[in-house]
Image (cartoon, rainbow, N blue to C red):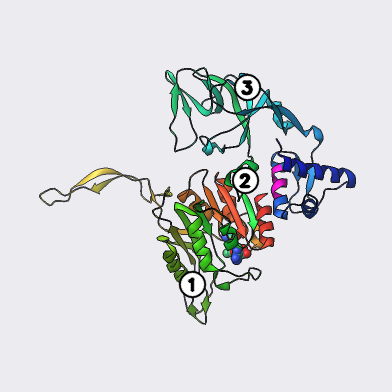
Amino acid sequence: MLTKKQKNVLDYIQKYTQKKGYSPSYDEIRKHLKLSSVSTVNHYVKILQEKGFIKHEKNTARSTEIKEKEGYIKIPFKGYISAGLPIEAVEEFETISIPSRLATQGSLFALSVKGDSMIDEGIFDGDTVIIKKQSSVEDGETAVALINNNEVTLKKIFKEKNRIRLQPANPKLKPFYVKEIIIQGKVISTFRNLEEQEKKDGKIRFNNIYRSDCVEFMKSMDENFVDLTVTSPPYDELRNYKGYSFDFENIAKQLFRITKKGGIVVWVVGDKIKKGNKSLTSFKQALFFQQVGFNVHDVMIYRKKNTPFMRSNAYTNCFEFMFILSKGSPKTFNPLRVKTVRQGHEKLPFNKGADGINRKVLGELKPEKTMTNIWEYAVGYGGSTCDKIAFEHPAIFPERLAEDHVLSWTNNGDVVFDPMCGSGTTCKVARKNNRYYIGCDVSADYVNLANKRLSI
Ligand SMILES: C[S@@+](CC[C@H](N)C(=O)[O-])C[C@H]1O[C@@H](n2cnc3c(N)ncnc32)[C@H](O)[C@@H]1O
């Protein structure tokens, strides 16, 4: 299924390629369709690629190749999954185009999804799901089912003794049970409708990277909009990020405004040493964050496993701070766990009795414990990331660092933001974990880099 804007982009690429024998550049597409930026073009190209309408060669200037026309087929689109109507009774007003590779799977139809009951399966409100008609599914498969003879629902199906469990894929929702069910089909693919999301949130589109000064960008965001920010500022002009200014105080104020109640900002920062004196800018920033209203919920350490020797009269610096700033008490904390060193059974101390004697009883050692607040990562290629392209940015943080915070402080379907996203690390891991992402960087080069990295 293509929206009008997506179809315009596809038509232009198609006509251009037929005429010239090669595809248009991103800039030509941008100019012809009067799109705001090359990253918007990249966004459409990515969708066309995901939907199978074009092939896309990485990192080349003219990089879009049209698939043959017979590369897609039309299937019935039956609108929203709605209560009260069996699928067969839904009148088919429309058809949608899907990649023909899916056609080999049998008789298909498409539905639009309402609600967030399946977000853990990567199916979000407004998505379109492709359903293969069939009358039974394996345990745990996601199916469209008719229940109570008149209600259609999309859930994971489990056969239990004397009943059938319909399991939402969302930890906030409980399963429900029925005696009988009529399976109408199984979900085989999902397409995200980004334009629907754009309409829903009004201004900022999810799953997109913007080129902007982050203060200006945040001003255009609604209050209480973001669940988690994971970011690293250009600290103490340590590196020259193409010479842009850095207005820390307004960044802190805007971050507080756009963070949801109970949301978190992870501020990853180190200090510069000038004439043997550490700047302590990191501390000053943490204190200012408190001043604008954040709690300093924790001060964590990002320890780098492999750091080069740097100073002759001090120990090698091997860490940066990760300030965990919360707007009120954190609304989500999914503690990451590690294996304990010793496991199995052992005599453990037991409560002293009235006689004061410390008795020991045989007990089981806990196999796991919550991690400490010092997190260690290898840095460099193969450590921070295996995406070679990311190293075109001088100061990336490790993917696992960003991912560990995303998993700790958010749930599926939450909004993750990086106002200074550089090579796009935070955005990449948010997408990987079924969170919505929004990235922003003042440098056009880095926005292009992040977009390329996310299209790998
Ligand atoms: C330390 S880097 C972030 C790297 C990122 N965490 C990664 O893993 O790739 C800081 C970024 O802030 C950006 N930046 C500097 N000033 C900015 C501003 N005013 N608004 C938005 N981005 C800015 C720089 O272009 C740079 O890419």
Give the structural element (helix, strand or loop) at label 1: helix
**Would residue 188 be seen by someone viewing this image from the given angle?**
yes
Query: Label 3: few (<14), some or many (≥20) within 10 Å?
Result: some
State the extent of the magenta-drawn residues as a range.
42-47
Give the structural element (helix, strand or loop) at label 2: helix
Label 2–label 1 contact, CB within 8 A: no
Tell which circle, 3 or 1, labels the residue nearer the N-terminal end. Answer: 3
Left or right: 136 in relation to 353: right
Query: Label 1: few (<14), some or many (≥20) within 10 Å?
Result: some
| Between 268 and 26, the one nearer to me in the picture | 26
Q: Which residue is drawn at 54% across and 53% down?
A: 222
Which callout, 3 or 1, points to the residue nearer the camera? 3
Give the structural element (helix, strand or loop) at label 3: loop
Give me the disc on residue 338: none
> Looking at the picture, which amino acid does disc 2 mark?
Glu
> Looking at the picture, which amino acid does disc 3 mark?
Val
Which callout, 2 or 1, points to the residue nearer the camera? 2
To which residue does mark 2 refer?
A: 198
User: In terms of image quarters, where does ligand 1 lie?
Assistant: bottom right
Looking at the image, residue 281 lies above or below residue 332? below
| Between 49 and 173, the one nearer to me in the picture | 173
Q: How far apart are the alpha carbons under marks 3 and 1?
A: 62 Å
To which residue does mark 3 refer?
A: 90
Q: How far apart are the alpha carbons under marks 3 and 2?
A: 28 Å
Residue 412, position in %: x, y? 51, 43
| Between 316 and 84, the one nearer to me in the picture | 84
To which residue does mark 1 refer?
A: 281
| Between 239 and 27, the one nearer to me in the picture | 27
> Is residue 44 part of the magenta span, yes or no?
yes
